[in-house]
Image: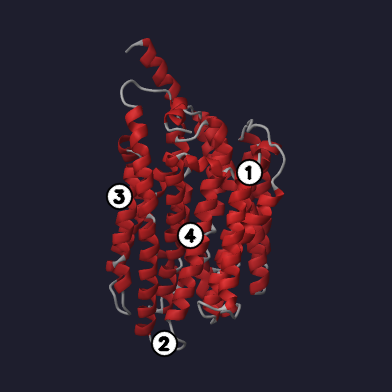
Amino acid sequence: MSLQASNAAASQRIESHVWVICGVVILGMIMSILDTTIVNVALHTLSGDLHGPIAQIQWVVTGYLLALAAVIPVTGWAARRFGAKQVYMVSLVLFTAGSAACGVSNSLTALVIFRVLQGVGGGMIMPVGQMIMAHVAGPQRMGRVMAVVSMPAMIAPILGPVVGGAILEHLHWSWIFFVNVPIGVVAFVFASRILPHTDSGSAGPFDFIGLALLPTGATAVIYGLSQLGSGSALGSTAVLLPVVAGFGLSALFVVHALRAEHPLLDVRLYANRVFAGASLTNLGLGAALFGAMILVPLYYQEVRGQNVINTGLLNGPQGIGALIAMPIASRLTERFGGGRVALGGVSVLCLSTIPLAFVGAHTSFVAISLVLVVRGLSIGMSFMPAMTAAFAAMRPEQISDATPQINVLMRLGGAVGTAILAVVLQRAIPHGASPGARAAGFDTAYWWALAIAALSLLPCLLLLRAERPAAEALQGEPIPAEATADALGV
């Protein structure tokens, strides 16, 4: 082996301390991402205990996702201003305190408010953790390390209903939130002792205008959609006014971000077609994954009469599929590129949604479980390749801007998908309906879920087309990873 090849192999070797830091980061990530779906299995219970219909109870999920999306853009500036380690530790404190407050809530309003507080902390955990790992790993090893760090984003949402069902079988629903408290304390102790201090660059002035425009716009759109579940017509003022206002505020944010020297989110990154395709793919996948995640638990409880532990376990096959797919997706991404693998994964996601649109009141549990395994495979083959492609397209100094944007789009997609499918489901199931009629309502919701998943094919095609010129430019002699972003046209 030549000296040059030996040095290259050594530079790509991942030291043990990197994996230790990776484990600390993942511990915090799992908490925050698990809470995006751990509540799903409890929606039926919460609806009865807190006396609210599904269209209102869904705000326990949507409010959390919106808080995640609202605070994530702040993380890039905060990491540069105060340091990524400090921001990560503050995030753990806020999330843990919010979890404790959720557990003692005695009304739907209080629970939603404290879920927002929980989301404020949880929203910063994953992007800041990814920043820390990107800096620790370095550009040449970033792909492999980020694939591992991104695992919680794929596994935790799928395993959430399983964990939630196990808790609800023996304990009050408040323990879904209380369980985070000891984990949060342990994660804080490890973070304070192990995580390194990293230099994320100069912060610059904070974009208060952007913070006012973007979260307000997203919340207005989702609030307008949720009004459909309260009986408002599609063309009514209660629906159209907030939706139109929300899109208007979002458009104003884009105009502002293009003109501002230090915007809340640097939308100029979307000039990089690889990053744009990967980010928009995560937007669609967020809507398809998080939105549809409320349907399976509710189907098992409201149509099949299953208890919470059985409901959680019956959601497990999807997690098994994702676990099987992730290592395979990592190898395929290195060989074929993120765009091609993600396109295949989303195509399988669409195909596996079709059988769920035909489930009835007596459909075999085995058949549904097999379909869920395939859906899990498709999710594992979609998220990670798209994320890896996005990070590979960035220069190191762009990571603090790129990481929040990917996470924002994923959470916004999840919030929109959850709101849409909750509204569709409530309107499709008449009051006092028989199990057969309820199953038909879920079929309608899954056709909508199929449409959402199919829309994700468009950014996958954009990502695939954008990667081809870059791959051709990089053929021949190996090129250092830090030069990859330049070849991609950033």
Mark 1 vs mark 3, foreground winner is 1
Q: Is residue 424 visible?
A: yes
Question: Label 2, on which residue?
Answer: 433
In depth, the one of 177 and 384 nearer the eye is: 384
Q: Amino acid at mark 2?
A: Ala
**Front residue of 163 and 373:** 373
**Cα distance in 3D space between marks 2 and 4:** 28 Å
Residue that carries the numbered disc 4 in the rendered image: 160
Looking at marks 2 and 1 on the same chain, the residue that comes earlier in the sequence is marked by: 1
Q: Which residue is mark 3?
A: 344
Q: What residue is rendered at 44% in x and 86% in y?
A: 430
For numbered disc 4, what is the local secondary structure? Answer: helix
Q: Residues within 10 Å of mark 2 (few under 14, many from 20)?
A: few
Q: Given the image, on which type of amino acid does mark 3 rest?
A: Gly
Q: Position of residue 117 (x, y in %)?
A: 67, 59
Say what amino acid the circle numbered 1 marks: Arg
How far apart are labels 1 and 3 at the CA level?
37 Å
Tell me the tag on residue 236: none
Q: Label 1 near label 4: C-beta < 8 Å? A: no
| Mark 3 Cα shell of 10 Å, populated few (<14), some (14-19), many (≥20) | some
**Disc 3, SS:** helix
Q: Considering only vertical position in the picture, is 263 above or below 409?
A: above
Which is in the foreground here, disc 4 or disc 3?
3
The disc at residue 259 is 1
